[in-house]
Image: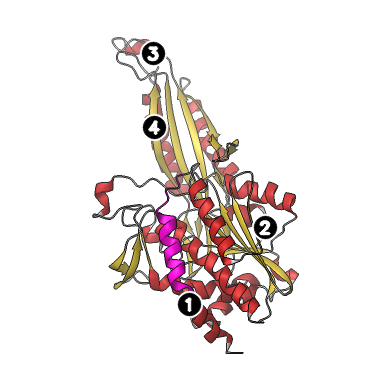
Amino acid sequence: MDNIQDTLNKLALELKADMIDFCQRLIKVPALSGEEKGVADLYLAEMEKLGFDRYFRDKWGNVIGIIEGTEPGPAIMFNAHLDHVDTGDYSEWDGYDPYGGEIDVNEMENQDQDGYESVEVIHGRAASDVKAGGACQIYSGKILIKLREMGYPIKGRYIFTGVVLEEPAEQLGMIKLIEDTFPEEGLTFDGVVSCEATSLKIYLGHRGRVELKVTISGVTSHGSAPWLGINAVNKATKFIDKVEDYIKRHHKTDEHLGDSSIALTIINCSPGSMCIVPDRCHITYDRRFVPGETYDSCVEEMQKIIDELSAEDPDFRATVEIAAVPRTTYTGLSVTVPNVKEAWKISREHPFAKAAAAGLRAVEQPVKYGYWDFGTDLSVISGREKKPAIGYSPMQEFYCHRPIDKVRVDYMEKALVGNVSIFQEMTKLNPKDFVL
């Protein structure tokens, strides 16, 4: 047999055109959250065409594909999500169709974000979040199938999962995949590789997130006699200032993930009518936190601020709660779950992360590390399930959710090989190596 690295590179070159075509086809199908059926259908059809051993859709709309190894070993889940954010104003896309999947030569950031390179790219919504990564993971699976056919030993089990409703942030698709689908189907997994944007680096964690809803209460009165009421918006201004000051003075810091933070994202009042002093002011906060903090502790600090203001002002009344919005999948199931994400981080020295690094070195890719600014479904994996996870993909975080959404074709080809090599190294691990 040829040297395994030469074989991987040869197979990647053979499959590159089909992988790019698949990515373009994914981009051409809109898949807003709750409307992912078209993209799910594409994934299932592609896995059938490529010869996955098993592929199916669960009741929540998630898609799962499985490739069995020739020898016993760990099960590694390679994960994508099916949905994407809205395109926004088409006029901001510099003439590109957000659903066009157009290929041309364009300026793109380099891996370290300190310069630009002129390279071939694919344009379109979700090119960077995460359709290019999903295409790479599917075709990395095809490389494993070909290696198996060629007589190479393949350890363990390769599992591809594409989950619904990642963008709304409650992680409903991933939660139901792990809590319902895997037990029902008799599936287990030992670790996860996410294809969220990493610029071909190994990503090792991100801050947690909780969406907090604060309601400030007042008393209505006629706008001509405001002294007869209690203006909830006026009371809210004191609260907003105190929150900003509190977080500025008490925020926590992680050496890798940075500072915890808070952002006021939504504010409105009711009744919201002319000539009526508002008796309710509703505020939504996006609170990011680091390991050592929890979403419960974030609620507690908000309650502490409310208690302090209530002690100072007998007319100040407020409540705080974690936001929970009903979500409906494209299969018609509706669930309400709290909008929370646990903070998580894995050490570079953990066997799972070291295996990922060994996989990249084996195919002569540089080993570099990073951490996401945004949150991912890996909070479910490492934050709740306490299983190891890393991120690795060709996309770049700088382009996510923006009207310059695009992905480098050269990075996609590298990720096609990188995924396979990472999988091969991870399946050499022993059960104890997956303890987080």
Q: Earlier in the sequence, mark 3 or mark 2?
A: 3
Q: Secondary structure at mark 2?
A: loop
Calculate the distance from the C-alpha at mark 3 to the C-alpha at mark 4.
20 Å
Which labelled disc corresponds to residue 229? Answer: 3
Q: Up-down: is 49 above or below 230?
A: below
Name the kind of residue labelled 3 in the image.
Answer: Gly
Q: Is residue 22 left or right of residue 183?
A: left
Q: Which residue is mark 4?
A: 267
Asked whether residue 294 is in view, the answer is: no
- The image shows residue 85 at horizontal and vertical percentages of 42, 47
Q: Which residue is mark 2?
A: 386
Crowding near the residue tagged with mark 4, few <14, some 14–19, many ≥20 C-alpha atoms within 10 Å: some
Crowding near the residue tagged with mark 1, few <14, some 14–19, many ≥20 C-alpha atoms within 10 Å: few
Which labelled disc corresponds to residue 14? Answer: 1
Name the kind of residue labelled 1 in the image.
Answer: Glu
Q: Nearer the viewer, mark 2 or mark 1?
A: 1
Q: Is residue 130 magenta?
A: no
Determine which quarter of the picture holds residue 77: bottom right
- The image shows residue 256 at horizontal and vertical percentages of 50, 64
Q: Nearer the viewer, residue 169 or 24?
A: 24
Mark 3 near mark 2, Cβ–Cβ under 8 Å? no
Q: Nearer the viewer, mark 3 or mark 4?
A: 4
Which quadrant of the rendered structure holds the N terminus?
bottom right
* Magenta region, residue range: 14-32
Specify the principal SS of the magenta part: helix
Q: Secondary structure at mark 4?
A: strand
Q: Is residue 22 magenta?
A: yes
Crowding near the residue tagged with mark 2, few <14, some 14–19, many ≥20 C-alpha atoms within 10 Å: some
Name the kind of residue labelled 2 in the image.
Answer: Lys
Q: Nearer the viewer, mark 3 or mark 2?
A: 2
Name the kind of residue labelled 4 in the image.
Answer: Ile
